[in-house]
Amino acid sequence: MLHPIGFSIPHEKLVTTFPTKTKLLSSIIPNERRKYIYEDENEYYNEYKQSFFALTTKKNGWDCMRHYEILANGCIPYFPDISECPKNTMTLFPKDLIIEGNQLFAKFQTKIIGGLTVDDMNEYINLSQRLYSHTVNYLTTRAMARYVLEKSNHPNAKKILFISGDPRPDYLRCNVLHGFKELLGPNCHDFPVISHIYKLDQSVDYRFIFGYKNFKELYGRGMSYTGLLDASYHNQELDSTVKENIVTKYYDIIIYGNLHREMIFYDIISELYKPNEIILLCGEDIHRCEYSKWVDKGHTVFLREFE
């Protein structure tokens, strides 16, 4: 089976109260480096919190972490070209609500902030609340992990081997993995370990292990997806027995975090596990893979940027 999937954001990144607004449109302009100056996540988030709207657009792919960061911070995305997004891409994203937001932005543009009426603010708050509710229900990492289990017909899976392949950051893989960790803790075992999703050990110099000194050296300056989980969410003892545990079918299902990257143990796994017990994710902007061949083998494939 082939299913669409998109990015997601950890629930802990969502605001808990409606932020005070001081500006109509965020000064962060996509693809303008001179206006993308934030090195600190709190400062970056605060820019969205104080803004009624924030511009976002298609990047390399339609799906973009910026969309989710805007929503998480109680700001409405102004997404001018959202109506051009393919039907099967970003299927969980609230496109209809974003179109409402575009219309509301056009209305707000004709007024200064001090001239907004009570009705204007109520309209904004109402839409913000609906977007927030949708984000909580469908766009958090935990919600996305549940979506993967439900669509693959494994809602009751208790033990998962999440094969990460290349350890470099990958928004889709990292956030879905985070969601599974929130659901199952160390019973979702990431192998090899994706170190940057765990809290940074200040006693370790990561330059000599993973090639970076701190999370800010990672893609997107590490914002929104790094350093969130306690180290106890990874059971190091399972690292040494991973192959043995595959052979004994210790795991209910196997998930490959990115089918474009190294699919270690696939030969052995495909012999021992039923095809529908093997799930593959693809979070690339552009698909150069023959993902249909994996579907033909009977695996469940989740595809981002699904035309």
Image (cartoon, rainbow, N blue to C red):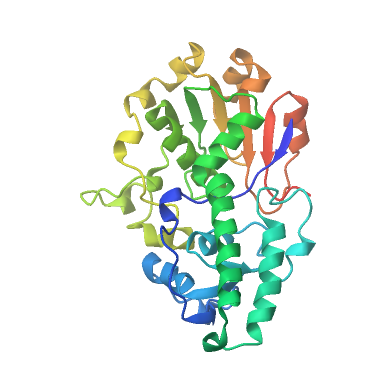
Q: Residue shown at 69%/71% (left/top)?
A: 102
* Front one among 117 and 67: 117
The N terminus, quarter of image: top right
Q: Residue shown at 65%/76% (left/top)?
A: 105
Q: Is residue 10 left or right of residue 82?
A: left
Residue 99 makes an appearance in the image? yes
* Front one among 32 and 81: 81
Q: Is residue 279 left or right of residue 177?
A: right
Q: Is residue 40 left or right of residue 119?
A: left
Q: Is residue 56 above or below residue 250?
A: below
Q: Residue furthest left?
A: 203
Q: Residue shown at 43%/73% (left/top)?
A: 20
Instruction: Tell me where residue 5 appears, x and y as whole percent.
Output: 65, 44
Total count of labels: 0
Instruction: Tell me where residue 303 appears, x and y as whole percent.
Output: 69, 42
Instruction: Tell me where residue 101 appears, x and y as whole percent.
Output: 66, 68
Q: Is residue 254 above or below residue 301?
A: above
Residue 79 makes an appearance in the image? no
* Front one among 194 and 135: 135
Q: Is residue 210 left or right of residue 102?
A: left
Instruction: Tell me where residue 226 appears, x and y as whole percent.
Output: 40, 52
Q: Which quadrant of the structure image shows residue 238? A: top left
Q: Residue shown at 33%/29% (left/top)?
A: 236
Q: Is residue 260 above or below residue 295?
A: below
Q: Is residue 144 above or below residue 74?
A: above
Q: Residue furthest front?
A: 118
Q: Residue furthest top?
A: 248
* Front one among 86 and 289: 86
